[in-house]
Image (cartoon, helix red, strand yellow):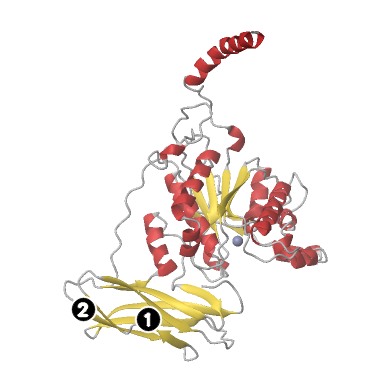
Amino acid sequence: MKIRSRCWLVVLFAAPLLARAAGPAPALPPDNRFKADILLVVAHPDDETGVSAYLAKVLDEHKRVEVLYLTRGEAGHNNMGPERAAALGAAREMEVRHALATLGIDNVWFLDGLDTPSQNVLQSLARWHHGQNLEEVVRMVRFTRPEVVLTWLPGFFIGENHGDHQAAGVLATEAFDLAGDPAIFPAQLAAPVKVNETLLEGLQPWQPKKIYYFSDASNQEQFKNTGPVYSVADLSPSRNLPYWQLAMNAFSFHLTQYRTYIEGLGRKSAAEQQSDWGDPVQLTFGKSKVEISRTGDVFEGIGTVPVAFVPPAPPAVAPLHPFELAGPWGFYQVFHQQHGLTDLPHAAIPEIAITRGADLQVPLTLRNTSTSAQTFSLSVSAPKTWTVQEYTPIVSLQPGEVVPLLVTMNSPTTDEKTTQQITCRAESGGQTVGVVELHVKLRSGGLPQ
Ligand SMILES: [Zn+2]
């Protein structure tokens, strides 16, 4: 009897609560603890290093900086212990959290992409399940509402040898263009219909105002005047250290990757350390939704009012070439066009660095753009120390037909100092229909193609 009375009491007191729970949730503004001025989107722990001196500088200007890592960098070596694979990823996540905490960055997010040791951006995108990953990056842009997105340059350069870096730049660019579009990933934008909603996310569309890039390419000269450049020699007023030194100190947490170098740093003089860390930070302007100058400050024109999403104009349709380089090089041609980035720096002649003695695969596209059947003959030329192993020398195509082709060749093991030139030529009816050139730098080690 006593128990029964208690049950009635519970029902009586719970009734108003249940009535409220069934109605619309009170409208709250977005959670401002996670609002970013800059969202850095990169692939691996340590990828922040190239811009961390700049980030330290804007943190002194009371800007909010957040970082999104698309992998945990678990595919590398470990200079600290036996841990590998997912365990190494756990170590690297913690190293970078500590590194960023010393700079004053606490909001650090990780997605579950797998670290992919390859130079080919398409392999990274495939391994990360491109569409699913894009949904996650768009979510984080809507969640953190950055004014500025900063990311790896989506392009293929000698020295920018990691497909994951390029893939981070591709996804960040796609998210920049899509996060403000209310038709994209609408479940993220739908209002919750239950108190404990598990599917509809209650986010708002968000259009960042600007996107900037940086690159690991060996030739940094090519990025001069493509965006703002920041000295790292100034003294941080909050830390009383130059910004290069703050960057170096943050880097010293990446022991699984660089233990030997970091221990050596401690034995170097201040001048030697500055020689390692004192280069200015060069950014490359991508695009902007506000009026700015290309080389002006990152926060020029940002203001406080959000910008509305405007659907981009459809890109001009590029003419179809009968014979062209495919794979990652071909992808970037289309990607830059589609995303209004045709002004981004790119190698005048497509390029790659590979290990001496490794095979080189040259992916090609051949299409018959005429109105009659055509027979093409292919030829490949390379320096005489190379061995051309395999390709199809004669191809017949019906009008409109397109085929992928692959030329495989073996590079010399000799120490060739100069950039190697590979040329593929397609001819039909005694006329050249297309010439593809590729510059190849030979080196010791490095990621597979
Ligand atoms: Zn990396």
In the rendered view, would you say 380 is above or below 285? below
Across and down, in percent, residue 19 comes to 50, 15
In the rendered view, would you say 425 is above or below 164? below
Left/right placement of residue 423 relative to residue 32 reads: left
Left/right placement of residue 233 relative to residue 306 reads: right
Left/right placement of residue 117 relative to residue 262 reads: left
User: Which of the 4 quarters of the picture holds residue 179?
Assistant: top left
Outermost residue to the front? 1
- The amino acid on which the numbered mark 2 sits, given as a three-letter code, is Gln
- Residue neighbourhood size for the residue with mark 2, other residues' Cα within 10 Å, grouped as few (<14), some (14–19), many (≥20): some
Outermost residue to the left? 372
Q: Quadrant of the N terminus?
A: top right
Across and down, in percent, residue 99 comes to 71, 52
Is the CB of the residue bearing disc 1 within 8 angstroms of ligand 1? no
Looking at the rendered structure, the secondary structure element under dot 1 is strand
User: Which of the 4 quarters of the picture holds residue 251?
Assistant: bottom right
- Mark 1 highlights which residue? 424
Residue at 74% across, 45% down: 237
- The amino acid on which the numbered mark 1 sits, given as a three-letter code, is Cys
Closest to the observer: 365 or 233?
365
Is the CB of the residue bearing disc 2 within 8 angstroms of ligand 1? no
Across and down, in percent, residue 275 comes to 72, 66
In the rendered view, would you say 139 is above or below 75? above
Outermost residue to the bottom? 384
Residue at 54% across, 73% down: 448
Looking at the rendered structure, the secondary structure element under dot 2 is strand
- Of labels 2 and 1, earlier in sequence is 2
Which quarter of the rendered image does ligand 1 occupy?
Answer: bottom right
Mark 2 or 1, which is nearer the eye?
2
Count of marks placed on residues? 2
- Mark 2 highlights which residue? 374
